[in-house]
Image (spheres, rainbow, N blue to C red):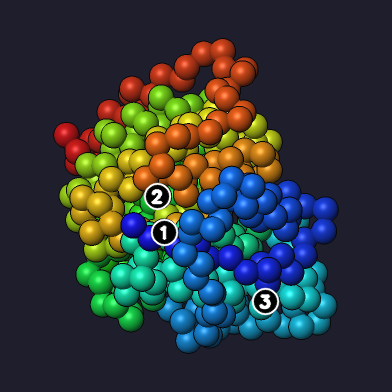
Amino acid sequence: MKVGIVYNPVYLEHNTGEHPESKGRLEAIVRRLKESGLWEKLTHIAPRPAIVEELLHVHDEGHIRYVREMASSGGGNIDADTVVSARSYDAALYAAGGVERAVGAVMAGEVSSAFALVRPPGHHATRAQAMGFCLFNNVAVAAAHALDKYHLERVLILDFDVHHGNGTQDVFSREPRVHYISVHQSPLYPGSGGINETATGNMFNIPLPPGCGDAEYVCVYDEVVTPLAHRFAPRLILVSAGFDAHWADNLASMCLSISGYAQIARRIKALADELCEGRLVLGLEGGYNLEALAGAAKVVFDVLLGNQNIEDRLGPCPSRRRTPDINSLLGQVKKVFSLV
Ligand code: ZN
């Protein structure tokens, strides 16, 4: 079973300065993979830059031009959170192209699954707007590529980043060939991601209260995500893989552990194996505590490789006082999504 990795130093050239979304994130993951010996066990897939025609499936021409021109003039701030540096346009093209290449490698059978370690992240980028650290929506570009180039009838996007992927929802809200399932914290940036936010029945948002940990996430995956995925029967599963629901992450208030990420990854891999011959591609989104990010990204690779030993150096959430009761929320979600 070959597992692919997409990485290139061009991703370090998106220079955000003093910012949680820094190049140190990718450096920490790569260091951990090398230390552990996993790096040599992975099949390395060289990314290419996405071409503008591919971005146009997802983004307005004006948005693409805006990012390009801002970078070529030396960079600046798009909003309080979202930074463009001189090399950010190229890094962003390679980020979108990197997830596309991972899709290509999986579709060609070169690898059974792949994880693209890219930045800038993507799931907040809407058709017309960069926001929330995101310039182009990498996973959405890759999903559009899967529809366009490989003529897949059904592509499922799962999103376990702690923030709602408003950009992905914006891009595909009227594309029935794509279903999007997001499990995120609410309330939290960007404020979207309510249960009823679906115009055509293909957006499935599961907004969890702060404080949810491994047990709540496993329950949501078993009782909601898994049956939704089975009902849709995708030909490919893409994942917006953010690790900012870890308890040590300062940008949110969830309580997932590294072991919890392994449990989620096992469920997603099982879905890909059962539903689409294992075709699974993950693209990195958030995750800002470097130790948690590196540890969780590593266990995702362990799960993809079939390794049983899961190392969780940070352990369970130390400050968890009470368990949020998500039963009534789950009941409501299942009703709205017609799972009961
Ligand atoms: Zn996030």
Give the residue type that dot 1 points to.
Answer: Val
Q: In the picture provided, is 160 more to the left or to the right than 1?
A: right
* Among the 4 quarters of the image, the one containing residue 133: bottom right
Nearest to viewer (mark 3 / mark 2): 2
Name which of mark 1 and mark 3 comes first in the sequence: 1
How far is disc 1 from disc 3 in space, using C-alphas? Answer: 28 Å
Label 2 residue near ligand 1, CB within 8 Å: no
Which secondary structure, mark 1? strand
Q: Which element carries disc 2, helix, strand or loop?
A: helix
Residue that carries the numbered disc 3 in the rendered image = 89
Q: Is the C-beta of the residue carrying label 1 under 8 Å from the nearest atom of ligand 1?
A: no
Q: Which mark is residue 95?
A: none
Do callouts 2 and 1 mark residues in contact (Cβ within 8 Å)? Answer: yes
Amino acid, disc 2: Leu
Dot 3, how many residues are within 10 Å of its Cα: few (below 14), some (14-19), or many (20+)?
A: many
Furthest residue to the top? 321
Quadrant of image for the N terminus: bottom left
- Residue 333, image x, y percentages: 30, 36
Q: Which residue is mark 1?
A: 3
* Rendering coords of residue 316 (x, y %): 55, 23
List the residue tagged with mark 2: 304
Check the image and report above or below for 314 versus 165: above
